[in-house]
């Protein structure tokens, strides 16, 4: 019996216009361009106008994605939004996207997995298509990190940016193509290495939590770095081993964009050349759930680097801890 897979039919994105450069940050906290660039690879990031919210970006990325495929909102069966910065704790941002794109037959939900949010959403959406029950699943990675970043804390404020990007999944017409495999893990022992201390049910908002600046991203950078290097590199190499492939077979490696040094360690473990690694951290910084589809957009839509039959590996690591990798063999219906 043929194995049903799903494929990425189109990619879209939304980038806020406002740029926050390293030199802008030099005026806000005790930092400098040299430190930021050498430690992370970031030059600038995009910042959404306050008050617009996640769905503003997610809807625009979704519309861009659907337009490129010539698909109407009414044809979408399900919407998954990977995010840690929803418009509100409830309702889910997926509901607001449903309204914004006129997806009148869809259901949907938000998926919270930190920087692995897009990867986990992608593989969840892929399995929904593979089940045979859904034909068109929209998967969005969208985060307004500026809404939870403390711009008085130099340890974190230089690292993050805002963006949204979306992919449309459909059943792959040809066997052996599409989203072929994935490895995904969580480890809750990382819960206090990267988190927001207050605002949830354990520590609801109060005068005290606001005064203590507990509604912002808190990160033990070194701890996260060590785990990311080890685990993300292991699953990046592992997905190749599991599928009898080597770095030479891979056309593009699309990693989460948190730190150039983490990305280099993964590429090294996979044995792939630098020129096959998609990197845009210098332009957009760490946009949490949006990094991987933003990179895919750059490589596919802007640079035309993705060809029918290419093997792509995606990998992420984030709060939780959460991490994983996915193997995609690109299907181009025009080829
Ligand atoms: O996407 C989700 C997952 N997140 C990640 O994967 C991030 C993983 N972590 C990292 O990428 C790195 O740990 C960071 C980029 C966050 C930090 O780099 P690091 O090499 O681990 O630096 P550090 O935190 O150990 O700080 C080194 C020094 C410290 O000064 P002292 O104690 O050595 O005097 C910091 O206070 O750099 C200082 N520092 C800064 N200096 C200038 C920290 N932030 C800044 C800054 N500008 N913005």
Image (cartoon, rainbow, N blue to C red):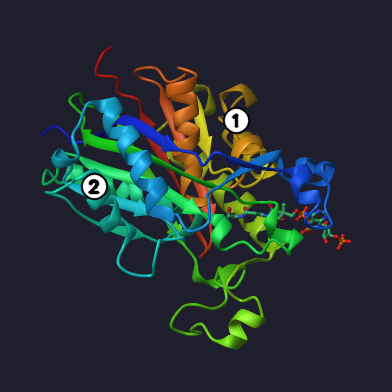
Who's the residue at 32% across and 47% down the image? 123
Provide residue 257's location: percent of width, then percent of height: 58, 43
Q: Quadrant of the N terminus?
A: top left
Ligand 1 near label 1 (Cβ, under 8 Å)? no
Who's the residue at 64% across and 60% down the image? 224
Q: How many marks?
A: 2
* Residue that numbered label 1 is attached to: 271
Mark closest to the chain's N terminus, 2 or 1: 2
| Tag 2 near tag 1, CB within 8 Å | no
Who's the residue at 54% across and 60% down the image? 147
Provide residue 54's location: percent of width, then percent of height: 42, 54
In the rendered structure, the answer to whether residue 227 lies left or right of residue 8 reads right
Q: Is residue 137 above or below residue 328?
A: below
Q: Quick one: 41 or 255, which is closer to the camera? A: 41
Q: Quick one: 168 or 267, which is closer to the camera? A: 168
Mark 1 Cα shell of 10 Å, populated few (<14), some (14-19), many (≥20)? some
The answer to whether residue 119 is seen in the rendering is: no
Provide residue 284's location: percent of width, then percent of height: 59, 40
* Residue that numbered label 2 is attached to: 127
């Amino acid at each position: 019996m043929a194995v049903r897979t799903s494929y990425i039919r189109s990619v879209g994105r939304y980038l806020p216009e406002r740029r926050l450069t390293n030199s802008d940050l030099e005026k806000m906290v005790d930092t400098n361009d040299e430190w930021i660039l050498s430690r992370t690879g970031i030059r600038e990031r995009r910042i959404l106008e306050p008050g617009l919210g996640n769905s503003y970006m997610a809807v625009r990325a979704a519309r861009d994605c659907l337009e490129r495929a010539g698909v109407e909102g009414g044809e979408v069966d399900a919407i998954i939004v990977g995010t840690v910065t929803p418009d509100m704790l409830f309702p889910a941002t997926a509901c607001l996207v449903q309204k914004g794109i006129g997806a009148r037959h869809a259901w949907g939900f938000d998926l919270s997995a930190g920087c692995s949010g897009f990867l986990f959403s992608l593989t969840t959406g892929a399995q929904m298509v593979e089940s045979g029950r859904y034909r068109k699943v929209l998967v969005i990675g969208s985060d307004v990190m500026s809404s939870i970043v403390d711009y008085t804390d130099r340890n974190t404020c230089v690292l993050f940016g805002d963006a949204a990007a979306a992919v449309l999944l459909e059943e792959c017409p040809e066997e052996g193509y599409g989203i072929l495999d994935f490895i995904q893990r969580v480890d809750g022992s990382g819960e206090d290495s990267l988190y927001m201390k207050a605002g949830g049910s354990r520590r609801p908002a109060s005068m005290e939590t606001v005064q203590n600046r507990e509604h912002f991203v808190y990160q033990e950078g070194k701890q996260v770095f060590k785990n990311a290097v080890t685990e993300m590199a292991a699953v990046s190499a592992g997905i190749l081993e599991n599928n009898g492939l080597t770095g030479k077979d891979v056309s593009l490696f699309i990693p989460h964009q948190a730190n150039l040094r983490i990305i280099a360690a993964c590429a090294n473990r996979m044995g792939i050349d630098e020129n096959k690694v998609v990197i845009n951290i210098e332009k957009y910084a760490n946009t949490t759930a949006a990094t991987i589809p933003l990179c895919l957009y750059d490589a596919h839509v802007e640079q035309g680097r993705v060809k029918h039959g290419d093997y792509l590996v995606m990998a992420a690591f984030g709060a939780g801890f959460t991490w994983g990798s996915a193997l995609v063999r690109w299907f181009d219906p025009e080829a």
